[in-house]
Amino acid sequence: MHRLLQRQLRKLGLGSGSAPAEWQRFVQNVDAVYAAFDGARRKLELSSRELLAANSDRRASEEVLRNTLEATADGVLAIGGRGSVLYVNDRYFELLDLPREVFEISDMDQRLAAVAARLIDPQPFLDKMRAVRSSGVTETFDILYLKSGRVVERSSRPFQVLDGPVGRVWSYRDITQSYMLEEQLRHQAFHDPLTGLANRARFADRLELALDRGRRSRSPVFVLYLDIDDFKAINDSLGHTLGDETLRAVADRLRDSLRPGDTPARLGGDEFALLLEDLLDVGAAQLVAEGLLSTIRAPLILDGHEITMDASIGVVESSFPATPEEILRNADIAMYAAKKQGKGRVQAYVSGMHSRVRERQQLTAELRHAIERNEIRVLYQPTVFLEDCSSAGAEALVRWDHPRRGLMSPDDFVPIAEESGLIGAIGEYVLMDACRLLAEWQGNPETRSLEINVNVSAKQVRDPDFVDCVRRAILETGILPGGLTLEITESAMIEDPERCLETLTFLKRMGVQLALDDFGTGYSSLSYLKRFPIDILKIDKSFIGDLYQSERETLLTSATIAFGKNLSLKIFAEGIETEEQLQHLRDLECEFGQGFLFSPPLSRDAIDLYVCEGAHRRAA
């Protein structure tokens, strides 16, 4: 019986056994009510304690969440169903360059206007916000380009709490650095990195559009193919640095001489092309070419040297139907005809002008016998640890010791080898020579850690027998495959990414290292670096040339190095020619490099001597 009821019965003089039966039943009912009330009270006390504990846990969780959101590198903004601001962190205001007072404005349209005022082009932002508010889209994504120069990636998702009004969480991420790098790579894909002119791909695209216009209007299109006469002498006498400056000066003169609608391009080496429209006939195009020759012949002063140049120009008028490749080929043939006439001339293409074609055919025939006649040479350019310039290994470079032309560079015969199907045999010859040298190094305790790089063309990568070729070279020479690096160009990945991925995966399983060569000269996507099994990133020399003179080049090189390191790649810099470039690369923590600052390409005996001396330097 409940204690309170017992006390009341005692006051009335009623014991539990002496009371009448009706009274006892009454007492029992009252006692049951007391017991039920007491149980409910206990449950209420327990629920209150649990609620207090839950509130404490919730406050702790909210504090952890708030501190986490404040510490993140992303801006976060949570908006309620009626536009109320539920949460915003400090990073949001920093990224968008906004004062906190913006969110004291109650009107959402005024708040949006304040944000839009920070953007270069506010209309896409306002259109996006209007669509979100009117249609209730689920997930959104867009890019904001701010007047401050910052580029911000923005995304959002809706949310709902306890069946209440739907709100939305916006996330803001700073992508300025990666955006700048991708823009530079995109520009590099269609522009020559040395001169800034259109490259071959861009020129072909512009030519195709011009041909379409010409077909519709029945107006001729003209292409000028320009080659600097004896440019090799400038490189040999003044060096590659002044040679590059000379090419930049030629590009500037072409830009200044042409009309706004004309397109100048650098096709490679010292060869340029120009696209001309709105001319009456080929005679008018030849007059333009003569004017360009006069401009190029003007003396050029560089670093105290007076440089005089001349050029040969081929002119071709479009014929219909014609492809950009055919027109460029005919202009090239006309240019070589001008050179044969004594250089410094303009020559229009004439049907049946096949001297250049015959010359290439002759070179192709001679190249077929070059290996059996022992005319293919393999030189080795040292690679070094930039920290102390000690030896890291070497890159194998192919040359053709032509019986009449002398030692020819790859640019002069590798395209012919690729077109004729000879690149496989030449590539295997170079690979075997490099592997034999690597086997000797690995057998010597002083040089066993050195590595050898071998260039692989896009056509080799696409060859179904290439993997077996590499496997044979490894087995026949007995090398440890980890010391062999195969350098693949970006073009191999772009042209046939699936075949390339399959080939590189097989090579990776064999244990060889893979390098992405000339990074930055073509644009595929930065995602390729994550998708393909690349070990080494080789920064193209065009990035290195102006490294210590251009803040932009320094920023891009720094971003590339940081990007590669984040993917755990080794970083190589090509074309290092000055101490200033070396020091800047050290400051940027680039690990490896090569270039004329350390050594030109060397013969087999000379490279052995070089790496042995380098190994001693590192050991010391």
Image (cartoon, rainbow, N blue to C red):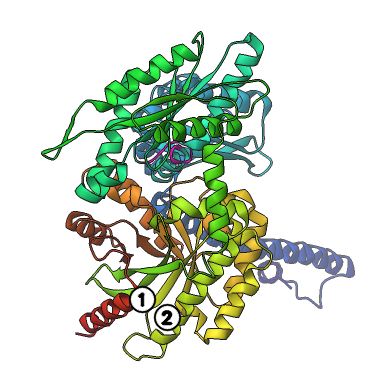
Start-end of magenta stretch: 187-193
Amino acid under disc 2: Leu
Amino acid type of disc 1?
Arg
Q: Are marks 1 and 2 in contact (CB under 8 Å)?
A: yes
**52 over 272 or under it: above or below:** below
**Residue 197 appears at what percent x and percent y?**
39, 32
Nearest to the observer: residue 543 or residue 340: 340
Q: Residue at x 68, y 23 (%)?
A: 321
Q: CA distance from mark 1 to mark 2?
A: 8 Å
Q: Residues within 10 Å of mark 2 (few under 14, many from 20)?
A: some
Pinpoint residue 482: horizontal percent, then vertical percent: 48, 79
**Is residue 269 visible to us here?**
yes
Q: Is residue 388 left or right of residue 454?
A: left
Q: Residue at x 21, y 49 (%)?
A: 237
Where does the image place residue 383, in percent across and percent down from the top left? 33, 69
Against 151, residue 590 (above or below) is below
Is disc 1 placed on a helix, strand or loop? helix
- Residue ID for mark 1: 604
Does residue 382 appear to the left or right of 266 in the view shown? left
Residue where numbered disc 2 is placed = 437
Whether residue 457 is visible here, answered yes or no, is no
Which one is in front, 3 or 296? 296
Q: In this rendering, which labeled residue sits more in front, label 1 or label 2?
A: 1
Location of the N terminus (image quadrant): bottom right
Residue lying at 53% horizontally and 68% vertically, measured from the top left: 371
Q: Quadrant of residue 497?
A: bottom right
